[in-house]
Amino acid sequence: MTELVLSYPEPGIARLLIHRPDVRNALNRCVRSQLAEQFTVLGQDPAVRCIVLTGGDQVFAAGADLRDIAEATPIEMHLRQVQRLWQAIAGCPKPVIAAVNGYAWGGGCELAMHADIIVAGENASFAQPEIKVGIMPGAGGTQRLTRAIGKFQAMKMLLTGQPLSGREAFAAGLASEVVEDGRVQERALELARTIAAMPPLAAAQIKEVVLAGQDASLDAALLLERKAFHLLFASRDQKEGMRAFFDKRKPDYTGE
């Protein structure tokens, strides 16, 4: 994979790096297919407990590669079934951290919003500028953005195409943390290390219930939460975690 680089910086942590520096990591069909493939594989790998997604120190992803779609017809766009590629990312059961430096525009912003945690640099730039080229977001930009920052902030971004800086994104609720640009990758790895040390079954259940409960009624979401809470008492990790607490030692979580 020349446009998507997979590495394992530490035990339990996988790092996916989008590498198309000549086009600011623009997302073409090849990159989206590779992302879908890797998220599917990593999501099923018991050795992986957290995934860091990044574009590197300069740019996260500056949007869709317009050369892929500029002359496409509606039928051609429909037949591409791109939503299936995005679904592989959205459906990944492992915690995902997006480390965002530079541009996260258009599809890049949508990609970042597929993560569970976003670490943004102070000079990161989040935008949905599709309206400026005659279209609109098509991979969750209108829906995930509104759920993240609310209708009025989202409408401003969507209808003007204007970006938010890293600090503005954090204030609006679009980023989990904002740090100095040079610390983004380091901080994402620190968080991944913390998560990778946690019991993976509990992490998976937390992610599943949070995402499933967002579009459910409060009563239904609370029911999902209780069922998942009860289920974890069947795990070895629950017994290990509580015994370690009483023994005042570090727990050894195995995902069982």
Image: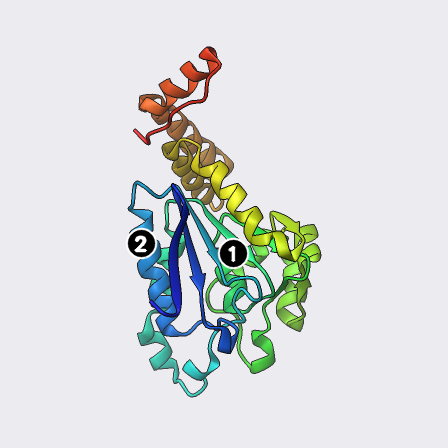
Q: What percent of the width, then of the height, locates residue 175? A: 61, 51
Residue at the spot of label 2: 40
Q: Is residue 172 left or right of residue 18?
A: right
Disc 2 versus disc 1: distance between alpha carbons?
18 Å
Which residue, as the protein is rendered here, is positioned at the far top? 246
Name the element at disc 2: helix
In the rendered image, the quadrant that contains the N terminus is: bottom left
Quarter of the picture containing the C terminus is top left
Q: Residue at x 45, y 45 (%)?
A: 211
The numbered mark, 2 or 1, whose residue comes first in the sequence reads: 2
Which one is nearer the viewer's eye here, 42 or 173? Answer: 42
Task: Say which element carries label 1.
Answer: helix
> Which residue is painted at 58% across and 57% down in the image?
146
Q: Are marks 2 and 1 in contact (CB under 8 Å)?
A: no
Residue 129 locus on image (x, y percent): 60, 73
Q: To which quarter of the image does residue 7 belong?
A: bottom left
Q: Eyeballing the image, is 75 above or below 48?
A: below
> Would residue 21 be visible to someone looking at this image?
yes
Rendered residue at 33%/32% (across/down): 255
- Residue furthest to the bottom: 71
Q: Any mark on residue 66, and which? A: none
**As shown in the figure, which amino acid type bears the numbered disc 1?**
Met
Image coordinates for residue 95, horizontal then vertical, percent:
44, 44
Residue tagged 1: 113
